[in-house]
Image (cartoon, rainbow, N blue to C red):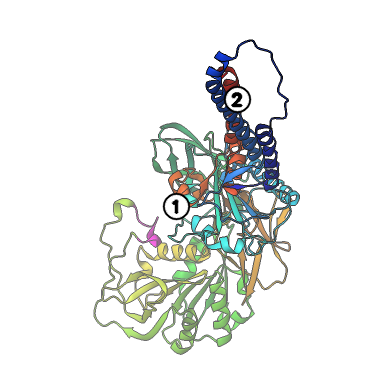
């Protein structure tokens, strides 16, 4: 036990007063005339003993009453061994506030963020003005931050707003020493105010513990588990978006409650217009896969969102996404010495969504590849180093290439391009003297989606006849798929992912000298699908979680800053240029859910839908036992919270018990005076 006001103990000297009064009777005795003292002598001894006992009891009661009163004013406390370091003097205090988007949820007391800001101020006020403070948020944890005075800490708490970032127990354990690096006191405490979601706070755990030099306090804003329904995934059934054609979106909806949702309203908006309305029923705790289909009405960038009518949790009701619908895809056809009337006729007459420009090999150097989505190298014999370098960089930045070999092509020069791709190794031309059939394609590949009717998927295809074929060995370390191959496993069509782009390598040329596959039913669908995938190589269906998005790369040689724009507001993300590629990091921006425009100068690169991370939608709190094992859990009641802080920092106060004991001694004095005569 220690005393927080030890100077009050000097008042214990007043205990000498009743002792002196007791030992020295300053009252003069009075003389009384009495006729016969014979009986008085007989009771003298008994009465004297009783009086002395009464006086000693009164002395003890009064001494204890005065002593307990003085001790009460000296503020006695018992230091809590597990929570206190025994340090005295000023204290270093960190208040860590969870300002993630899940804190926009509310209960009868109001919105979570407003509640924790109020409690944070009360925590700071419960300390002395001479203590030092540091205000941190989970959205922007800053290491090596200086501590400030009480008044400035209160101002910083008031300024806190929402900012999404993942915050876990493991991260807290790792950064705690760095947060206190500039602390001026050895008495160090941290208060963490949060909803402590299990899906985020316990997403990363560790067996490591923080040092005992830190006093860790958890202030859970709520232990209530809300029912919540949200969209956990939106993906297009196909990445081919075409005006006037249906677009199907596949949804995954989760019902995190023990209640059945009979009719959940689902509304789809594109560019501010409602394009589809539907409803779904969900069983308790069901994860349901469903779909929405509507007709694409416009070309260009489409900013869309899907809205659920879910109460009371509404912060995650809308999911945003953007996608690009091209009016016509620009295609550059580079023709060599060997032509294919079948391919050219198909591109000009059938593929109406593609705008075709044809040039010869010598004119290729004059073309700016950035003006095209797809490049077709059809029967070229040679390729210069300069053009190979240009094509390689263009593909890596998102371009799509279709390559058809020439019978007399310079394999060494073509291999130079494929070496830059790291896509595979070309071999010699092989003349097929014996009949070699094509292996039935794997129709479950994503490439063949929408090509075969469900009833025809397992049907045996009649194989084309092949007269000659180039040997090609895909690089096993690359990302590729053998779309078509012969029975002897020689590839006919290989799809390779090169950076952000796609390369479709055909090992045969599309004319009858090589094969009759140009007359086959598979020819047109294969070319059409290859063109579509190549023109949409970057998959312009964009949605990102706020604070957790991956690095976004765009082709750019401009020195102008890239900005995000929305509602006349601008944000500048971190950007790192390298070899014509600009890498963008959006994670440190304070964004709200919604669709944003990505611009550089007057150029619109893309529209991106930013959403609340899925983990924030699961409001299940972490188990209280986990918090109790790793720190002190405080009540959110203001009075209880303040008292808990005082006990944690100073110890358990005993002044109440000393006052009660003082009253008991005063009552004892009255009883002694009344009953002992």
The quadrant holding residue 373 is bottom right
Instruction: Answer above or below: position of 139 versus 37.
Output: below
The quadrant holding residue 486 is bottom left
What residue lies at 45% left-to-right and 80% top-to-bottom?
422
Quote the CA–CA distance across marks 2 and 1.
Answer: 90 Å
Instruction: Answer above or below: position of 586 versus 50.
Output: below
Residue 189 at x, y = what percent?
60, 53
Instruction: Answer above or below: position of 183 versus 123.
Output: below
Q: What span is colored magenta in the figure? A: 445-453
Q: Secondary structure at mark 1?
A: loop
**Nearer mark to the viewer, of 2 and 1:** 2
Q: Residues within 10 Å of mark 2 (few under 14, many from 20)?
A: some
Q: Secondary structure at mark 2?
A: helix
Q: Residues within 10 Å of mark 1 (few under 14, many from 20)?
A: some
What residue lies at 39% left-to-right and 57% top-to-bottom?
449
Can you identify the residue that label 2 sits on?
669
Q: Which sits in the foreground, 145 or 217?
A: 217
Q: Which sits in the foreground, 632 or 236?
A: 632
Residue 295 among magenta residues? no
Label the magenta part by its dominant secondary structure.
loop
Tell me if residue 196 can be seen: no
Can you identify the residue that label 1 sits on?
237
Residue 511's disc is none
Tell me if residue 31 can be seen: yes
User: In the drawing, does residue 408 fall left or right of residue 641?
Assistant: left
Q: Which sits in the foreground, 367 or 636?
A: 636
Residue 281 at x, y = what percent?
42, 34
The quadrant holding residue 275 is top right
What residue lies at 35% left-to-right and 82% top-to-bottom?
471
Residue 58 at x, y = what percent?
60, 28
Considering only order in the chain, which callout, 1 or 2, is on the residue closer to the N terminus? 1
């Amino acid at each position: 036990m220690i005393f927080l006001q030890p100077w009050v103990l000097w008042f214990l000297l007043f205990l000498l007063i009743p002792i002196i009064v007791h030992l020295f009777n300053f009252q003069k005795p009075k003389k009384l005339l009495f006729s016969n003292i014979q009986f008085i002598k007989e009771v003298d001894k008994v009465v004297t003993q009783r009086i002395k006992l009464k006086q000693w009891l009164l002395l003890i009661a009064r001494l204890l009453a005065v002593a307990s009163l003085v001790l009460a004013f000296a503020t006695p406390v018992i230091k809590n061994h597990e929570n206190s370091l025994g340090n005295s003097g000023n204290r270093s205090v960190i208040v860590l506030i969870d300002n993630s988007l899940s804190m926009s949820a509310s209960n009868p007391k109001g919105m979570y963020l407003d509640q924790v800001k109020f409690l944070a101020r009360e925590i700071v006020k419960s300390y002395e003005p001479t203590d030092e403070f540091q205000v941190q948020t989970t959205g922007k944890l800053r290491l090596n931050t200086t501590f400030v005075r009480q008044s400035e800490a209160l101002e910083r708490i008031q300024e806190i707003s929402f900012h999404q970032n993942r915050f876990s127990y493991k991260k807290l354990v790792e950064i705690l020493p760095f947060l206190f690096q500039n602390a001026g006191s050895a008495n160090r405490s941290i208060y963490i105010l949060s909803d402590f979601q299990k899906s985020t706070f316990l997403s990363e755990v560790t067996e490591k513990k923080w040092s005992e030099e830190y006093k860790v306090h958890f202030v859970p804003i709520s232990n209530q588990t809300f029912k919540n329904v949200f969209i956990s995934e939106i993906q297009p059934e196909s990445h081919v978006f075409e005006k006037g054609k249906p677009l199907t979106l596949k949804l995954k909806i989760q019902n995190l409650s023990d209640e059945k949702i009979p009719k959940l309203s689902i509304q789809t908006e594109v560019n501010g217009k409602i394009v589809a309305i539907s409803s779904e029923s969900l069983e308790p705790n069901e994860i349901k896969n469903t779909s929405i289909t509507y007709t694409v009405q416009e070309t260009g960038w489409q900013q869309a969102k899907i809205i659920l009518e879910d109460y009371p949790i509404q912060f995650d009701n809308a999911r945003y996404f953007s996608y690009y619908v091209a009016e016509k895809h620009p295609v550059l056809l580079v023709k060599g010495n060997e032509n294919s009337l079948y391919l050219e006729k198909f591109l000009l007459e059938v593929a109406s969504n593609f705008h075709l420009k044809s040039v010869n090999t010598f004119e290729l150097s004059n073309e700016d590849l950035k003006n095209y989505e797809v490049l077709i190298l059809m029967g070229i014999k040679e390729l210069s180093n300069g053009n190979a370098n240009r094509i390689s960089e263009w593909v890596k930045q998102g371009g799509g290439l279709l390559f058809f070999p020439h019978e007399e092509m310079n394999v060494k020069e073509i291999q130079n391009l494929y070496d830059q791709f790291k896509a595979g190794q070309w071999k010699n031309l092989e003349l097929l003297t014996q009949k070699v059939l094509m292996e039935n394609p794997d129709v479950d590949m994503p490439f063949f989606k929408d090509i075969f009717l469900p009833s025809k998927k397992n049907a045996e295809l009649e194989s084309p006849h092949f007269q000659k074929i180039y040997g090609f060995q895909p690089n096993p370390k690359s990302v590729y798929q053998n779309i078509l191959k012969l029975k002897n496993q020689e590839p006919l069509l290989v799809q390779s992912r090169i950076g952000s782009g796609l390369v479709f390598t055909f090992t045969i040329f599309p004319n009858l000298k090589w094969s009759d596959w140009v007359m086959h039913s598979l020819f047109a669908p294969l070319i059409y699908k290859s063109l579509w995938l190549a023109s949409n190589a970057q998959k312009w269906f964009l949605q990102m979680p706020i604070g957790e998005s991956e690095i976004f790369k765009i082709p750019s040689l401009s020195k102008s800053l890239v900005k995000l724009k929305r509602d006349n507001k601008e944000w500048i993300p971190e950007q790192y240029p390298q070899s014509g590629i600009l890498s963008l990091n959006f994670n440190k921006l304070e964004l709200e859910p919604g669709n944003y425009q990505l611009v550089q100068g007057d150029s619109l690169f893309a529209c991106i839908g930013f959403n609340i991370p899925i983990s924030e939608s699961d409001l299940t709190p972490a188990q209280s036992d986990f918090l109790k094992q790793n720190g002190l859990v405080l009540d959110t009641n203001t009075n209880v919270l303040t008292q808990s802080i005082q006990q944690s920092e100073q110890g358990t106060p005993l002044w109440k018990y000393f006052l009660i004991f003082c009253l008991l001694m005063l009552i004892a004095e009255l009883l002694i005076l009344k009953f002992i005569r």
